[in-house]
């Protein structure tokens, strides 16, 4: 295990001791830690308060871009599909994690908190499209005109 993963795990341990969930994440560029995050679900009512997303938000706000292609993510736990999607959209391609979702489930972490591809597909099958009504302005076409 390298120094960066050790820091992500240390953040996770500290977060548990403060009443939070066992997840910490750091983002690295050129051998330097540039952002850190822990799950904040125990502090604020924001379901997207995952360690990886918190670290990404901090960094993106600081550097004022959504492109994180030059950065590396270290997460103490296996990123869920929500976090994986955000990493994909931010062009993060080097991602390391320590503990698996199954490790968490085996320690009685609620399985419902572990978002899987199967669960996403179940949700996708429940989604229903409601089309624009005639005469409504189309926001996507409006955006495309820029």
Image (cartoon, rainbow, N blue to C red):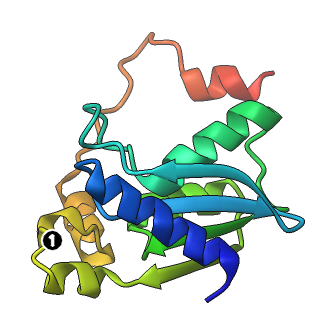
Instruction: Write down the quadrant of residue 89 in the picture.
Output: bottom right
Q: List x then y, in percent, for residue 71.
A: 78, 62
Q: List x then y, in percent, for residue 120.
A: 29, 65
Residue identified by numbered label 1: 109
Report the front residue among 15 and 146: 15
Q: Is residue 60 left or right of residue 98?
A: right
> How many labels were placed on the picture?
1
**Residue at (70, 42) in percent of width and height:** 59
Quarter of the rendering occupied by the N terminus: bottom right
Q: Is residue 92 left or right of residue 26?
A: right
| SS category of the residue bearing label 1 | loop
Tell me if residue 25 comes above or below residue 55 in the rendering: below
Q: Is residue 111 left or right of residue 47?
A: left
Report the front residue among 74 and 95: 74
**Residue at (44, 70) in percent of width and height:** 79
Tell me if residue 41 comes above or below residue 81 in the rendering: above
Q: List x then y, in percent, for residue 77.
A: 41, 74
Report the front residue among 3 and 47: 3
């Amino acid at each position: 295990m390298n120094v960066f993963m050790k820091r992500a795990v240390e953040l996770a341990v500290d977060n548990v001791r403060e009443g939070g969930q066992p997840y910490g994440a750091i983002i690295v560029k050129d051998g330097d830690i540039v952002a850190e995050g822990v799950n904040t679900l125990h502090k604020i009512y924001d379901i997207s308060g995952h360690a990886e997303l918190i670290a990404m938000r901090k960094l993106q706000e600081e550097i004022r871009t959504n492109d994180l292609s030059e950065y590396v993510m270290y997460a103490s736990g296996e990123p869920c599909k929500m976090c994986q999607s955000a990493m994909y959209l931010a062009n993060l391609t080097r991602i390391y994690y320590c503990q698996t979702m199954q490790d968490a489930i085996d320690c009685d972490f609620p399985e419902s908190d572990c978002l899987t591809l199967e669960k996403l597909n179940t949700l996708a099958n429940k989604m229903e499209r409601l089309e624009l009504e005639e005469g409504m302005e189309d926001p996507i076409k409006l955006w495309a005109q820029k």
